[in-house]
């Protein structure tokens, strides 16, 4: 079964988590996050962006982003990418008038609490990829209310283990799993059937990245995705194959 624990990665530099205070008049405010992009690979072509929610405290939030053009709120995977050459740097977008083509994300909520948005930059074949998380938080009376940042900073520093839910899920062709491993050592990735039979086991050779699995070679059904590090399970996620 084709398997890849990582791919060639673009360089992404986030400009920090964003926090604010909820308006007292009942209106909805907006927080803006930025990412600088560098094509540090040999890829020469179009790069796309998709976003997913990694964690969410408010019951309501909405998000949109700009990358070559600005998409409406709720669009998670824009169809219009940006053409880049090897070594090219794309500075973050400055504003919605789009005086620059680089990335900018726009988060809104009318409730206190934090949300972590993951931004995946990829080419059409997903041979070249990387992601950057940005945390957004509104405090009720002060930005000090945004305690979510403590867990975000720990995650970014590699102080915790993390395994994402597979995406897409259910899957018919290829699925991906993002991971981050604390004290990386002797790590491996496995797929188990619903009866506990090991279908696939592969070694992981880096502490963080994205695992790609060709799910078209799996029979339809429910599977468990498991990552082990230092002899212990980091966690399991359920994968549905159509």
Image: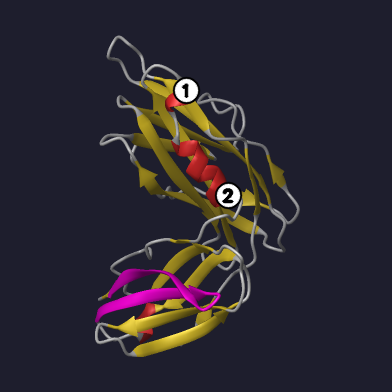
CB under 8 Å between discs 1 and 2:
no
Q: Which mark is residue 162?
A: none
Residue 31 screen position, x and y as percent: 46, 26
Q: Residue at x 31, y 66 (%)?
A: 169
Residue 68 screen position, x and y as percent: 54, 40
Residue 173, placed above or below residue 129: below
The part of the image, by quadrant, that contains residue 44 is bottom right
The answer to whether residue 150 is magenta is: no
The part of the image, by quadrant, that contains residue 95 is top right
Check disc 2 and report its element: helix, strand or loop: helix
Between 76 and 6, the one lying in front of the other is 6
| Position of the C terminus by quadrant | bottom left
Q: Residue at x 36, y 14 (%)?
A: 23
- Reading the image, the residue beneath label 2 is 156
Please provide the residue range marked out in magenta: 221-240
Q: Residue at x 43, y 87 (%)?
A: 200
Residue 58 in the figure: left or right of residue 123? left
The answer to whether residue 238 is magenta is: yes
Any part of residue 130 in sight: yes
| Position of the N terminus by quadrant | bottom left
Q: Residue at x 71, y 61 (%)?
A: 41
């Amino acid at each position: 079964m084709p398997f890849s624990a990582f791919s060639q990665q673009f360089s992404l530099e986030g400009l920090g988590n964003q926090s604010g205070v909820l308006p007292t008049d009942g209106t909805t405010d907006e927080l803006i996050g930025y990412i600088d992009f560098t094509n540090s690979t040999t890829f020469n072509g179009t790069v796309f962006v998709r976003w997913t929610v990694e964690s969410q405290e408010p019951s309501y939030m909405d998000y949109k982003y700009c990358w070559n053009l600005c998409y409406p709120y709720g669009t998670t995977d824009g169809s219009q990418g940006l053409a880049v050459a090897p070594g090219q740097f794309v500075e973050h977008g400055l504003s919605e008038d789009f005086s620059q083509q680089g990335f900018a994300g726009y988060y809104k909520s009318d409730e206190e609490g934090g949300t972590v948005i993951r931004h995946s930059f990829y080419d059409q074949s997903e041979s070249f990829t990387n992601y950057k998380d940005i945390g957004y938080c509104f405090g009720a009376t002060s930005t000090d209310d945004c305690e979510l940042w403590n867990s975000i900073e720990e995650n970014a520093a590699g102080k915790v283990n993390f395994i994402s839910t597979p995406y897409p899920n259910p899957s018919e062709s290829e699925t991906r799993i993002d991971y981050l491993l604390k004290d990386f050592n002797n790590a491996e990735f496995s797929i188990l059937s619903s009866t506990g039979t090991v279908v696939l086991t592969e070694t992981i050779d880096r502490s963080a990245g994205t695992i790609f699995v060709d799910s078209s070679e799996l029979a339809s059904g429910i599977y468990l995705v498991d990552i082990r590090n230092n002899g212990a399970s980091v966690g399991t996620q359920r994968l549905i194959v159509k």
